[in-house]
């Protein structure tokens, strides 16, 4: 069953920006320090912290500089089976083939 989210993409991006800012401040870094350590331009970092808008590549670079890249490991993982029957059904599905037959 699909889960329903009360969050919008805009809210999630602003929350991520707030978390990045909090991590930066916890390390005692200025914006310019994080920008230099991550390779993200200062303007992009400022825009991200203010609006939540950032490219995925820049977000990953910021997470790497903050030593939090592993936080992305669980993102968009295939859901675990809820029962033995689901596991058995997954094993018996034929493999997908590419191209035309």
Image (cartoon, grey):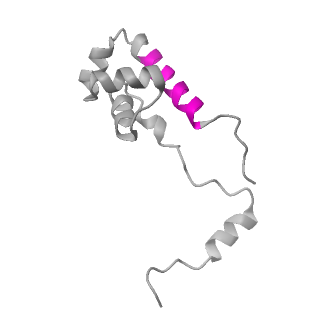
Q: Main secondary structure of the magenta part?
A: helix
The magenta stretch is 9-23
Queried whether the magenta region covers residue 3, the answer comes back as no
Residue 81 horizontal side relative to residue 25, left or right: right
* Most foreground residue, 3 or 81: 3
Residue 72 image point, x, y percent: 47, 39
- The relative height of residue 29 versus residue 51 in the rendered view (above or below) is above
- Residue located 43% across and 21% down the image: 49
Point out residue 40 in the picture as x, y percentages from the top left corner: 28, 29
Question: Measured from the top left, where is residue 45 in percent x and y?
Answer: 35, 24
Residue drawn 47% across the image and 91% down it: 101
Residues 91 and 16: in front is: 16
Kindly give the residue lying farthest to the top in the view shown.
28
Q: Residue 67 occupies which quadrant of the picture?
A: top left
User: Where 88 sits versus 59, above or below?
Assistant: below
Picture residue at 27% right of the left edge, 15% below the top: 32
Image quadrant in which you'd find residue 90? bottom right
Q: Eyeballing the image, is 2 above or below 52? A: below
């Amino acid at each position: 069953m699909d889960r329903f989210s009360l969050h919008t993409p805009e809210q999630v991006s602003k929350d991520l920006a707030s978390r990045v800012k909090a991590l930066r401040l916890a390390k005692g870094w200025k914006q310019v320090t994080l920008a230099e350590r991550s390779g993200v331009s200062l303007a992009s970092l400022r825009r991200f912290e203010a609006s939540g808008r950032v490219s995925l590549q820049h977000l990953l670079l910021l997470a790497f500089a903050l030593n939090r890249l592993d936080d992305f490991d669980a993102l968009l993982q295939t859901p675990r089976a809820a029962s033995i029957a689901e596991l058995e059904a997954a094993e018996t599905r034929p493999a997908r083939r590419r191209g035309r037959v």
